[in-house]
Amino acid sequence: MPEPEYAIVGLIRKAQGIRGEVVIEPLTDKPDVIFGAGSRVFAGTRDGNLAVARDVKGEEEIPTLTISGSKPFKKGLIVQFEELRDRNSAELWRGRYLLAPFSEIPPLEDGQVYLHDLIGMKAVSTDGRDLGTVTTFYELPQGIMLDLDTPRGSVLVPYRPEVVVQTDIEARTLLINDTLGGLDDDSAEDG
């Protein structure tokens, strides 16, 4: 599988005001760098792929936005893009994921992982049992939740250090502390 060229760095939640500003939920540890004036981001999908649009001539293009300014707002940012100058144009971007090229963002520190890299990873318990595979993730107010496809069906697991004790990017595995139970096949039959 080829290495992705882009990282998911934010999600546009809504338009803010009448001048084209948007409220962004940053999905990066470096929002001041990613959303600094002069930086650019691209329209993307939840899977970290570029979103392709067609221009008026029917030719494919990748929507690109250039940041002209940003400021903190609640748990996110208010961002002004050069290309969005009114509320109507900003509203068209609601719910859109934003991507940045890996070449333009600071490298990950030890122990960090891009969220889209978690999809497809195998979850293994600390005692060696296969628990399932990560199919997607959800960003909830209480934190990131991983959706595992298990033999018993879908199970949500919090992506927190006391639960996911190790993330091995190279081996594509998550080591899960399942001392709370609920993930093994036998627990449903024991009750």
Image: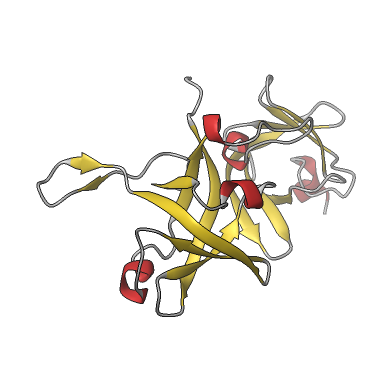
Which residue does the image show at 48% across and 44% down from the upper left?
Answer: 99
Query: Closer to the camera, 26 or 49?
Result: 26
Which residue does the image show at 53% across and 29% down from the upper left?
Answer: 103
Q: Can see residue 154?
A: no
Q: For the C terminus, which image quadrant? A: bottom right
Instruction: Tell me residue 13's x, y (percent).
Output: 50, 66
Q: Is residue 181 left or right of residue 6?
A: right
Instruction: Tell me residue 184's x, y (percent).
Output: 77, 41
Which residue does the image show at 53% across and 44% down from the upper left?
Answer: 8
Instruction: Tell me residue 93's x, y (percent).
Output: 38, 62
Q: Can see residue 166?
A: yes
List the single residue furthest toward the left. 57
Q: Is residue 102 left or right of residue 20?
A: right
Instruction: Tell me residue 70's x, y (percent).
Output: 56, 62
Q: Considering only vertical position in the picture, is 123 above or below 63?
A: above
Q: Considering only vertical position in the picture, is 151 above or below 37?
A: above
Query: Closer to the camera, 153 or 134?
Result: 134
Q: Is residue 130 left or right of residue 51?
A: right
